[in-house]
Image (cartoon, rainbow, N blue to C red):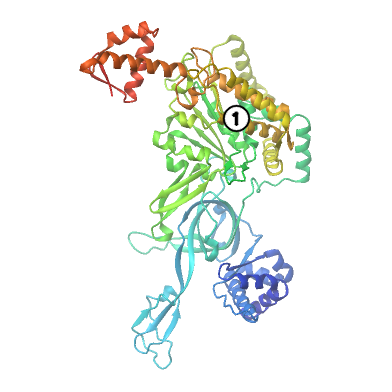
Amino acid sequence: MNQTDLSAIWESFLRDRKFDSVMALADSYPDRQSLVISFRELEVFSSEAADALLEDPDQSLEAADAALLKVVGDTPLEVYVENASVRVFGIPNRIKVRKIRDVHVGKLLAIEGMVRSASKAYTAITKLCVSCQRCGFSFFIHPKTADGHIVCQNQVCDRSGPFKRDLDHSKKTSKRVIQLQENPEDLRGGELPENIGVILTGDLVEGISPGNRVILNGIVKIHEIKSKVGETLDFEYYIYAVSVEVIEREFEEIDISPGDEAKIHDIASEGALDQIKSSIAPSIYGMDDVKTAMALQLVSSPAVHHIDGTNTRGDIHILLVGDPGIAKSQLLKYVVGLSPRGIYTSGKGASSAGLTAAAVKDEMTDGRWTIEAGALPMADLGLAAIDELDKMQDNDRDALHEGLEQQTISVNKAGINATLRCRCSVIAAANPKLGRFDRYEPVSSQIKLMPTLLSRFDLIFVLYDTPSKDLDTRISRHILMADVDESVCTPKIDPVLLRKYIAYSRKNIFPKMTEAALKVIQSYYLSVRAQYDSGPSQPIPTTARQLQALIRLSKASARLRLSDVVEESDASLAVSLTDCCLKSVGTDPETGKADAGAIDTGFTKTTSDRITTIRAIIRELSGPTGLATLSDILEESDKAGIDSDRVSKVIERLRLNGDLAEPRDGFFRLI
């Protein structure tokens, strides 16, 4: 189809079917520069024009933009929409990044993926204005021909220059380059995700951030791979974007048929929690509380947007701290596979940039700095699993603080200031400092994590590997039978259907708290707090942060049942899980009493008081020399009821924290 026929069809289409949209565009230009139409609309109007758009999109879109300019020009509005563009979405030819080949060059395709990195928006010249220095005539040329042979377009002159560039009168457009990566959930085992560069122009540069899931409709093109030794004959693909559809809703890409929906409601009516719990890593025996928490985490709670503009996260964070060899990693990998959007990473191979975001130079943008999303932004609206959290460097772990609570990642690098969203649940696993747990020391002091990071987890499970004849018999029986009978490891709900169940519940169920459920939560919270109201010297057993966790868990329980109402049973389940974690983590092992300081500060009230007492003893013994001997410290501590082993531990902790110096052997000075 020639250009004239195409222009005529597009003009008729815009006048007959989209005239109101054209007028709205003209009225809001230049703030709005895109006329968005559906491919289906065009196909119904003219199948020939639709086919031409897929096969020769450059020619078709040029005709469409010319038709748009003419239709607006025929109206009484005094506006010239020279930078307006027709944007077509809903392209039927969908393809994966790794499947793009030479036959697709020049064709219009739809590609689904995740924005891995994005450059800053900058200005690009589409038509360069030059003026002849001999006759003064100005005209436009393509920027790529600026360094070639140019002849003055003034017929009277018709000379080869010299010419002067006029940037002020040149035609420009906004431009941005992003890297589109395959969705992690679309990869099979062992496959590495492939990327492709995408050029965005005009108003497409707005509203795209690393971590966004998008359907990108664009034209496949090629450009030469740059080399330090000069020109090459090697080329790589890139996409010139025509339109971008941002997938904002959670799990929108999961296709749920009416038959699937019926099965989902059947599961809910037959006791969803027990079935889903049994479908999480069935090859791993027991761990009912952990699997219950994972089931709640997969659906999580809706985020709360308050009238004052603040937000409370709905995603549930879980930390598993346990002895080696109890299948923590296996649990993490299994739950990532169940989540419709899941990212798995290990602390040994993850840096702060790999978890949050990095500023890197992009070759497609001539070395400009771009933002590259890490694991948390890539898991936006999904689940991120971090294994071996204790093996990460301290600086890398510090980057998690903002992402866990505020669910944003702030990037301030290489002159780039941006905020990425990471609205995801986090499940992490860590090991004790010394390999195995000491039951008589606070858990927080035995793992290499900051108390400020520990307090951001809603549930912390301590998993002990304790020899027990009865339990060991059951576990060994389960493992051995799994080798003989496949049904032992068969989940009650097929993983594909379970992923759809999770997606359905998160898309459609938004539970509200009832007065009865609130009373259960409040009663538990007040009862724990009331145990220690005898004076200011008593430890604080729990804080308002645990109260918010109780609300999240209760709503998640209701959502798991596909209920719009949080009932007493949901609140009771949340209380049971929280109480289990509080007793194992937030308890002073010396007194057996709940103490939130074990998590929030890393010290129980007993330990904190002991440290204060020993510091006072050292200060009292220092005298004019400023030094206290170890023997004197031990003697005075014994009088205060503190045995020598605990004194040694406190002294070692003070030394590690930089609060105590040992100028010579056996002599100490407070700093």
Tell which of 575 and 540 is nearer to you: 540
Q: Give the class, few, some or many, for how many residues have Cα within 10 Å of label 1's Cα (few <14, many ≥20).
A: some
Residue at image coords 36%, 80%: 164
Q: Quadrant of residue 140?
A: bottom left
Give the total of numbered labels: 1
Question: Is residue 226 visible to us here?
Answer: yes
Residue at image coords 25%, 15%: 622
Question: Is residue 260 positioned above or below 43 on the image?
Answer: above
- Residue 405 location (% of width, % of height): 52, 38
* Quarter placement of the N terminus: bottom right
Determine the secondary structure under disc 1. Answer: helix
Question: Is residue 568 positioned above or below 358 on the image?
Answer: above
Q: Farthest residue to the bottom: give it.
A: 156
Mark 1, residue position: 547
Residue 112 left/right relative to 388: right
The amino acid type of the residue labelled 1 equals Leu
Residue 454 left/right relative to 477: left
Tell which of 184 and 507 is nearer to you: 507
* Quarter placement of the C terminus: top left
Question: Is residue 388 positioned above or below 639 on the image?
Answer: below
Question: Is residue 284 visible to us here?
Answer: no
Residue 476 left/right relative to 262: left
Residue 23 left/right relative to 44: left
- Residue 433 location (% of width, % of height): 42, 22
- Residue 302 location (% of width, % of height): 65, 40
Tell which of 578 and 625 is nearer to you: 625
- Residue 4 location (% of width, % of height): 63, 81
